Amino acid sequence: MATRLLKFGAALRLYTNKTNLLKSRRECFATVTSLKETLINQPPTKTSTLDCGMRIASEDSGAATATVGLWIDAGSRCENDDNNGVAHFMEHMAFKGTAKRSQTDLELEIENIGAHLNAYTSREQTVFYAKCLSQDVPKAIEILSDIIQNSKLGESEIERERGVILREMQEVETNLQEVVFDHLHSIAYQGTPLGRTILGPTKNIKSITKNHLVDYVKSNYGPPRFVLAGAGGVDHNQLVELADKHFGKMKGPHYDEIPPLVQPCRYTGSEIRVRDDSIPLAHVALAVEGAGWTSADNIPLMIANTLMGAWDRSQGGGANNATNLARASADAGLCHSYQSFNTCYKDTGLWGVYFVSDPMQLEDMVAVIQNEWMKLCTSVTEKEVNRAKNILKTNMLLQLDGTTAICEDIGRQMLCYDRRIPLHELEARIESVTAKTIHDVGMKYIYDHCPVVAAVGPVENLPDYNLIRSGMYWIRV
């Protein structure tokens, strides 16, 4: 066997020399295009606007499948105390039958073409989208237009979905991360629309009627707030024609009275603690006010967020973790897991760290997080920033894997920026950030600013808010 392998190796070397099959390392590197050239050569995002105000944006990659969806510039932020939860309720009702299709007909029609129909509601957006074969895009858009414009909103379906949503709320209450982030919003944006939950309070869900749903749709759904986004095997001109055919005659939004001006949601540094010693681990979120989508500080804050990183004890790593906080968490056993977050809205945001920890480690974990925050403001190095920029660019590209992810990126950016930022421009913006940029945004958003703290579980050992506030700056000679 060994003799045979040696003969095969000699023959391979001879063949390689003759055909020049194996190139030198320098030649191989010369054939690899740079990241910037690769990003510039990505398919362009084409955009159009109909006379009715509806925007269409798409990226044609020539794939056999496609994702098309309707991104609506309305979410729970458009609600008030009396109808909080109606946006999410309407999302549920959209698939429960229309004037021309029963729920069964709708489901069978989708299944017969092998498509997937889905939706979600956030604080600022509502999304309905379909994944299908590229040849079935016209059918998918016709179905989307039908469920948006002609939902039947039958009383029996409303009652059935009321029970579904109440069960969903019970499930969310068992997800402590969701609970903590709802608490975090409630205290960070007290008395403002962003302080309310997306699902709404139980009493509202039990009392929402067809009139609430009709009024919400009439006041918030309309072509000026719609973006039809497509990715994969989509033809932009075809999308424009389909949008004009199915949405071009749609009017709205309509108001019975002039709506109030949308006021910026006021941020308030504060805390909330829900102590429950029956829970084995404490779940804590510590944050400051971040930047909105369109702020020039958004990219530096994303890099600062990457510098904080994420870690889970199941991942291992120990001393070989890239970020300082991950190494400290692993070495001292300060937490079971943590993740940094940068949640953005139109005019504000929340930037911070969420972690799960043993009760007696809370004080040390908070101190280490705040110490890392102070380093961001004063002493983060170019080497650390360059590493974070590479990680961010990699994650940015990995998150655009598949037609659905690209379609979601297009729809969200069209609502946030009224355009889709090209990948090479985004890469250039990331590359322009230096250590000084991080120091500057750290001083602007973190240093000596009042944080928000939300904690659930055995949180007796969590430091007093005044102590946490005093850790937001350094006094050094």
Image (spheres, rainbow, N blue to C red):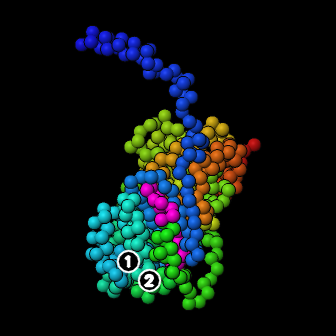
Where 215 falls versus 168 (above or below)? below
Name which quarter of the figure residue 349 lies in: bottom right
Give the total of numbered labels: 2
Q: Is residue 424 magenta?
A: no
Q: Position of residue 190 (x, y in %)?
A: 58, 72
In the image, taking residue 204 as reference, residue 268 lies left or right, namely: right
**Mark 1 or mark 2, which has the lower sequence index?**
1
Residues drawn in magenta: 220-238
Few, some or many residues within 10 Å of mark 1 (<14, 14–19, 20+): many
Q: Residue at x 49, y 70 (%)?
A: 241
Q: Which mark is residue 368?
A: none
SS for dot 1 = helix
Residue 50 visible? The answer is yes
Asked if the residue under mark 2 is in contact with the one under mark 1, i.e. CB atoms within 8 Å, the reply is yes
Q: Residue at x 68, y 52 (%)?
A: 441
Q: Position of residue 407 (x, y in %)?
A: 48, 59
- The C terminus - image quarter: top right
Q: For the view shown, which residue lies furthest in the left direction?
A: 1
Residue where numbered disc 2 is placed = 213
Name which quarter of the figure residue 271 lies in: bottom right
Residue where numbered disc 1 is placed = 93
Q: Is residue 236 magenta?
A: yes
Q: For the view shown, which residue lies furthest in the right direction?
A: 477
Q: How far apart are the two marked residues, 1 and 2, measured between alpha carbons?
A: 9 Å
The three-letter code of the residue at mark 2 reads: Leu
Where 465 falls versus 128 (above or below)? above
- The N terminus - image quarter: top left
